[in-house]
Amino acid sequence: MSGRRIVPIGPYHPLQEEPEFFKLIVEGETVVDLEINIGYNHRGHEFVSPELTYDQVPFLVERICGICSNSHPLACVLAIEDCAGIKPPPRADYIRSVVQELERIHSHLLWLGLAGHFIGYNTVWMWAWRYREHVLELFEMITGNRNHYAMNKPGGVRRDIKTEQIPQILAVMDVVDKKVMMLTKAVLDDPVIRSRLEGVGVLTREQAIAYSVTGPTARPSGVDIDVRRDDPHCAYDRVPWDVIVFNEGDVLAKTKARLFEMMESTKIIRACLKDLPEGPIETRVDEVPPGEGIGRTEAPRGEVFHYIRSDGTNRPLRHKVRAPSFMNIASNVVAVKGGSIADAALTLAAVDPCYCCTERMAAFEDGKMKLSGKDLLRLSWQKTERIRERF
Amino acid sequence: MRDAEARLKSLVPDAEVYEHNPCRLYIRIPRERLTEAAKLLHRECGMRLAICTGVDTRDGFEVLYHFSEDRSGTIYTLKVLAPKDDPQIESQAPWFPAADWIEREMHELLGIEFPGHPNLIPLLTSDADWDKNKFPLRRDYERRSDAHER
């Protein structure tokens, strides 16, 4: 069959439930070109941010993403601290690293589950999300929330990790290690999964560099970058861990990179909790002088970049936010070319485009809502209390 | 002096370097020299484009190209200024795909022109009902009356 045809995916992604539009241009079964349309959910954070004070801005950027809801505020407060020239106390650094790595584990498990779902392997989906639940409960115990943790503030963190909480965190890390090992074996040993992922959606090293992709989209393509190691912040330069790099650039390498990164994360968390220094958890920030500041951290999907320009008032003059998916999604144009339509959905998902999962539940009976928003909130508080009482 | 900084200085002698701290360098260059400087940083010094920021200042539109040198963890920010009555900066997208989307974004939100860009269409705003002459990140953009006073 000759002639080009268009296969639309979106504007509402059928699998990822996210508003972005991929226009696949195909010749027969083969994808020859891709057009990407975004902007269906543009919320104008950079426009709103200059109207808020430095104390309020982290709460705003936290809501950019339901999954990276620690990375954005962390990069934002790092930018404010860079501008003001202050350093948070060591204990705050360690707590920030712990929460950031917990976020990486929960995000990678979420992606792994979705990837399993995409290739029709729903067992992986159910299992991965089940273990993710333990991590979310840890978040609830440490920060009071499953998502939107509100842990970071300019100068430090809002909540301390109590000594009696540490055994519980370590116990969950044991579970995560064991189960991630099991899932890794399931992926690597299963010939069906292997052949479904191997050689699919290859992003070469040169392409990865040309598109300036970051995180688990760049590292599996042989680009050895990780902001946690390259631009040391929090406690990352004080605990031992490794950067996971592969050279194949296909979906299998991306999957392996994420699986192995989770094990590095548990390593970091264990080391941070072992060496957790005593002392205060915040430094007082009196003023942010006129100037500029850049903060960046390694989110689960790659580098989060925040730039703040201050004019000496209590609000930023300009606040630029770059989420990793902004760079990573654009690289899909080269990654899907030459593949088949069936591979395209998987390749597009392999960069782990951002996805929100903050809804908990809604109960309906005979078409009537059984529980109102207030009831759900009450149930949620009760559960938080139950978790707190346990420890 | 760092290697990249020295090479940049010899390429663009009138570059003004401001070191905020050892990992954050801001380099102001004339806008005509941007492409050469960006090519030097990306192709020869192996830096990655983190992102660009467009700022509306009193003197004109300031565009910041943040390059990240991952070996040393340093961010080199190239600053160029375009006057308000001639908001044009040569596009980096033809040779550097990473600059494609962000230049489109600055074009629609700040109204900066990027001559040479292969596809300068709106990225984020709606092509159906957004006024193409309104630029929300400009200082003169009318904010809603119930917004906080600045």
Image (cartoon, rainbow, N blue to C red):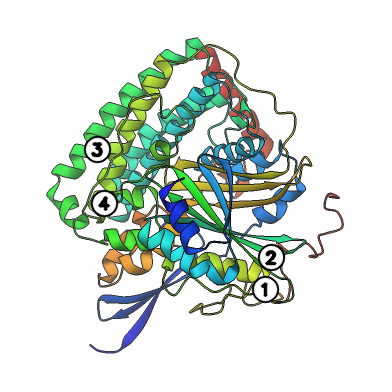
In this picture, residue A342 sits left or right of residue B65: left
Identify residue type, mark 4: Gly
Q: Is the residue at mark 1 from the same chain as the one at mark 2?
A: yes
Labels 3 and 4 positioned on one and the same chain: yes
**Residue B87 got which mark?**
1
> Which of pointers 1 and 2 lies earlier in the amino acid sequence?
2
Query: In the rendering, which numbered label is found on residue A222?
Result: 4
From this viewpoint, is residue A264 visible?
A: yes
Marks 2 and 3 sit apart, C-alpha to C-alpha, by: 51 Å
Q: Nearer the viewer, mark 4 or mark 1?
A: 1
Q: Residue at x 35, y 46 (%)?
A: A225
Residue type indicated by callout 1: Pro
Question: Marks 3 and 2: in contact by CB < 8 Å?
Answer: no
Q: Please, what secondary structure does the residue beneath circle 3 have?
A: helix
Q: Amino acid at mark 3?
A: Leu
Residue A229 or residue A91, whichever sits in front: A229
Same chain check for tags 4 and 2: no
What's the mark number on residue B61? Answer: 2
Residue A66 pos. (x, y %): 54, 44
Measured in 3D between alpha carbons, the distance from the residue under mark 1 to the one under mark 2, in whole angstroms, is: 7 Å
Residue at label 3?
Answer: A183
Query: In this picture, is A277 found above or below A361?
Result: above
